[in-house]
């Protein structure tokens, strides 16, 4: 069963997450940040992972802690659900158009966290949310999930479309990477026999 549930509590946030890699894209998300909820719903729906997330954070200060910590929590749940990462395709990629916008996402479930973020916004905020926080979410997610993650907006004008295409791209790439590979027969997809550690494999 490729499922995991975690609870993450700090002085800044309290987050509960349940994740099912083999779901149907069902979601129940509540962070107190409307736009972030919308993006996490997109992540669940287009990855076909079932996601339940409830977060309470210090929103009276700003959205930073809640945004970052939801990325950390979902990433940790993904890593736990993957276990030893046996029998998966490991790599995933997506090219996502959204009206005038086109974004490319490529990832490796390598257990070596790394984020390349080539996304620029023309405004500092989307609604009440600082656009700089989206990079923080992706960075936190890649860190705890153990993903080498490249996100590149090739072009676009509408900031909403740009960030939504990033989350949808992540969703579709994850959907491919976590999928079972029948020919692997439960083996770790690496010449080292384990994912993570030193480069290579």
Image (tube, rainbow, N blue to C red):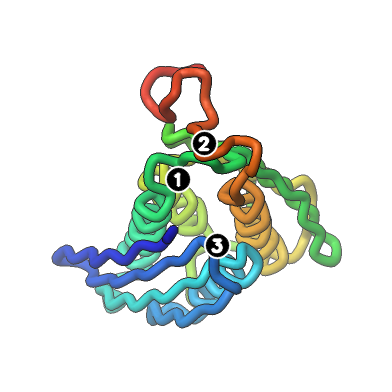
- Of badges 2 and 3, nearer the viewer stands 2
Residue 152 pos. (x, y %): 68, 44
Q: CA distance from mark 1 to mark 2?
A: 7 Å
Extreme residue in the front direction: 185
Q: Is residue 119 above or below residue 91?
A: below
Q: Is residue 114 left or right of residue 38?
A: left
| Residue at x-position 59% and y-position 35% | 184
> Mark 2 Cα within 10 Å, few/some/many (few <14, many 20+)?
some
| Residue at x-position 74% and y-position 65% | 158
Disc tally is 3
Residue 3 pos. (x, y %): 40, 63
Q: Which residue is mark 2?
A: 148
Q: CA distance from mark 1 to mark 3?
A: 23 Å
Q: Are the residues tagged 1 and 2 within 8 Å (C-beta)?
A: yes
Residue 31 in view here = yes
| Residue at x-position 61% and y-position 67% | 48
Q: Is residue 1 left or right of residue 45?
A: left
Residue 182 pos. (x, y %): 64, 43
Q: Which residue is mark 1?
A: 142
Q: Write down the quadrant of residue 117 in the picture.
A: top right
Q: Are the residues tagged 2 and 3 within 8 Å (C-beta)?
A: no
Between 137 and 87, the one nearer to me in the picture: 87
Picture disc at residue 13: none
Residue 122 in view here = no
- Of badges 1 and 3, nearer the viewer stands 1
Q: Which callout, 2 or 3, points at the residue further toward the start of the chain?
A: 3
Extreme residue in the left direction: 11
Q: Which callout, 1 or 2, points at the residue further toward the start of the chain?
A: 1
Q: Which residue is mark 3?
A: 124
> Mark 1 Cα within 10 Å, few/some/many (few <14, many 20+)?
many
């Amino acid at each position: 069963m490729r499922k995991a549930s975690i609870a993450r509590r700090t002085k800044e946030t309290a987050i509960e997450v349940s994740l099912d890699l083999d779901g149907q894209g069902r979601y129940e998300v509540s962070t107190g940040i409307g736009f972030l909820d919308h993006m996490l719903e997109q992540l669940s729906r287009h990855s076909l992972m079932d996601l339940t997330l409830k977060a309470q954070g210090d929103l009276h200060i700003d959205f930073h802690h809640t945004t970052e910590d939801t990325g950390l929590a979902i990433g940790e749940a993904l890593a736990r659900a993957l276990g030893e990462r046996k029998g998966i395709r490991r790599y995933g990629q997506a090219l996502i158009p959204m009206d005038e916008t086109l974004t490319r996402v490529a990832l490796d479930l390598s257990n070596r966290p790394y984020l390349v973020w080539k996304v620029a916004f023309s405004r500092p905020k989307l609604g009440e949310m600082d656009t700089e926080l989206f990079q923080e979410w992706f960075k936190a997610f890649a860190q705890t999930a153990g993903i080498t993650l490249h996100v590149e907006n090739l072009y676009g004008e509408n900031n909403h479309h740009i960030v939504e295409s990033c989350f949808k791209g992540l969703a579709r790439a994850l959907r491919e990477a976590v999928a079972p590979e029948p020919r692997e027969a439960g083996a770790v997809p690496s010449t080292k026999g384990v994912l993570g550690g030193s480069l290579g494999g």
